[in-house]
Amino acid sequence: MDQDLKDYLDQRFTAVDQRFTEMDQRFTKMDQRFTEMDQRFAAVDQRFAQMDQRFTEMDQRFAAVDQRFAAMEQRVAEKIDAAKASMFQRLDEMAATLEEGYRDTQTEVLKAVYSMGERLQMRGDAQEAIITGLQKRQASVEARLLEIEKRLHLPPAA
């Protein structure tokens, strides 16, 4: 019985060992599959690392482009400010020139009016002198006429 028991137990242990061997083989296959998956994940990680590197490079390029745009924007702003300053300076110069021209024109007009006023005054004085002379002559003619009328005894004309 010992032998039967021994044979029975040996068969059982052999069956158990076979099962463990099969399980070990299954675990080995699973390990291989996990290794393959790890390799695939490593490849995917490499691709992601490459993509991250590309994104980093693109970020650097965008940063460089942003710097260029900022510099360009600053230059444009400076040019606009310079153009504004130049335009305002020209406008101020034009305003000063117009004011000076306005004052000069005003002065010339006043001189012309004053000169014309003086001439008119002189003409008026001359006209007054002429009128005064005519009035004196008229008075003289009237006085003579009155004397003639007195001598001739004519009634005075009304």
Image: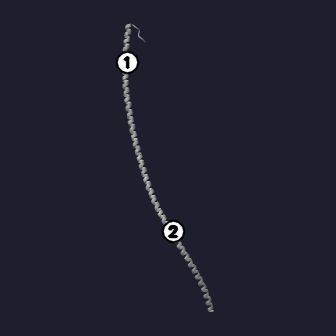
In the image, residue 114 lies at what x, y percent? 37, 30
Q: Secondary structure at mark 1?
A: helix
In the image, residue 115 lies at what x, y percent? 37, 30
Residue type at the position of mark 2: Arg
Q: Residue at x 37, y 14 (%)?
A: 141
The residue that label 1 is drawn on is: 134
Q: Nearer the viewer, residue 145 or 44?
A: 44
In the image, residue 121 lies at what x, y percent? 37, 26
Q: Nearer the viewer, residue 114 or 155?
A: 114
Quarter of image, res 113: top left
Q: Which mark is residue 2?
A: none
Q: In the shown orientation, is residue 75 left or right of residue 5?
A: left
Mark nearest the camera among 2 and 1 is 2
- Quadrant showing the C terminus: top left
Q: Nearer the viewer, residue 39 or 142?
A: 39
Residue 14 vertical position relative to residue 31 in the rendered view, above or below:
below
Total numbered circles:
2
Crowding around mark 1 (Cα neighbors within 10 Å: few <14, some 14 to 19, many 20+) is few
Residue 147 vertical position relative to residue 12 in the rendered view, above or below:
above
In the image, residue 27 lies at what x, y percent? 57, 78
Residue 9 vertical position relative to residue 79 in the rendered view, above or below:
below
Contact between labelled residues 1 and 2, with CB atoms less than 8 Å apart? no
Q: CA distance from mark 2 to mark 1?
A: 125 Å
Quarter of image, res 12: bottom right
Residue type at the position of mark 1: Leu
Q: Residue at x 61, y 87 (%)?
A: 11
Q: Residue at x 57, y 78 (%)?
A: 29
The residue that label 2 is drawn on is: 47
- Quadrant showing the N terminus: bottom right
Residue 13 vertical position relative to residue 48 in the rendered view, above or below:
below
Q: Secondary structure at mark 2?
A: helix
N-terminal label among 2 and 1: 2
